[in-house]
Amino acid sequence: MAQSSIQGRFLWQAQLAEDAAAVTPFYARVLGWSAQPWAVDNKTTIFSARSGPVAGMSAMTPERHAAGARSNWLPFIGANDVDAMVAGAEKLGARVLAAATDIDQVGRYAVLADPQGAPFAAFKPLQSSAPKGMPQHGEMAWQELATSDFEAAFDFYRSLFGWQLIHRMNMGANGFYLIFGADGAQRGGIYRQSHAETGPFWLTYTSVPDADKAAATATQSGGHIINGPMDVPGGGRIAQLRDPKGVAFAVHSMGASASAPPPSTSPPKASPPPKPSPPPKAPSPPKAPAAPAKAAPAKAAPKKAAVKKAVAKKAAPKKKAAARKAARPAARKVARKVARKSAKKPARKVARKKAVPKKKARRGGKARRKK
């Protein structure tokens, strides 16, 4: 097969595991992979499907773990020229996480972070391994990128790998889901993540015979279900999971009568799987409550009531005195009016009494004179 066929294809996935020995049997049971040490380096485990090797796992060094490195599955995307790909990616805003390096009997690769921060590897194998046709059980079936800016992320990968926008699916409140691919073949989707604190990341869906059984096996083996199992457009079912160490991965299965490609139009989930969080810190002992915490409010109430009563008592005489002062002018006016009236009335009566006898006397005198 010509080397040009690997450009922009998802060829491999690898994980630096905190405890590779513990999770290796887990993936063998859940995904049906066979595991064996790598002939070049027995510290690396090679996972194989029936069609051949599909993934690798190495133990994380204590130095990298101490530096804050986290376990995750890293997709390896085919590049015809790794060094040219790295130079082009840097011009587009990517960062180099691991410089281009040759792996004996394997090929050349470099680890990058796209402009939004999602890590991936550009990879050129010595032997072409681009998959053909429908994914077989144990092979990568679909790739999803959860990112902060899905439009800008797609423009980056389109410029770098020549991906095409095949379909833009409107998911309503969840925004758009961009389905990308090449030569008309769909390879994955890009959408805006809802959990920004986890950072952008790639999630690989592995083809399995039965997604429900794979999810059940994962929980029985110490893993956890993030989302699903559920039906997706295209005639299949998916489940998003975590291994016993918290690393996210996903499975996809097709129905017996389905002929559509694996999840060709799988929508973004309401809660996309977050990246594994760092090991939890030991919980600190609870703080003892302050001694007067409960007693203080009970004492405060009587004090406030007593103060209010005292203030009310002090304020009462003042209010009465003010009322008396305000009433004094009015009382004085009333008293003056009464005094005036009482003073005028007696004077008139006395005058009339004195005047009457005089008139009678005059009248009597006249009468006497006439007689």
Image (cartoon, rainbow, N blue to C red):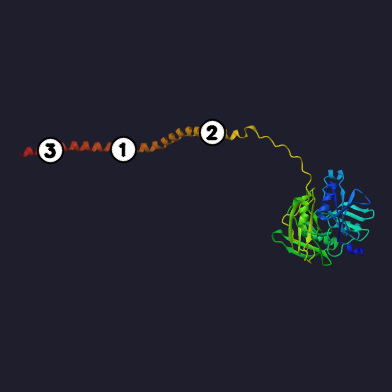
Q: Earlier in the sequence, mark 3 or mark 2?
A: 2
Circle 2 — which element?
A: helix
Q: Which residue is mark 2?
A: 302
Nearest to the observer: residue 365 or residue 66 = 66
Residue located 84% across and 45% down the image: 65
Is 297 placed left or right of 4 in the picture?
left
How far apart in space, not on screen, are marks 3 and 2 (Cα)?
89 Å
Residue 132 point in image, percent of width and height? 87, 64
Q: Which residue is mark 1?
A: 338
Q: Which residue is mark 3?
A: 362
Nearest to the observer: residue 104 or residue 173 = 104
Tell me which amino acid carries mark 2: Pro
Q: Nearer the viewer, mark 1 or mark 2?
A: 2
Is 124 placed left or right of 293 in the picture?
right
Circle 3 — which element?
A: helix
Crowding at label 2, few (<14), some or many (≥20) Cα neighbours within 10 Å? few
Residue 188 point in image, percent of width and height? 80, 61
Circle 1 — which element?
A: helix
Tell me which amino acid carries mark 3: Arg
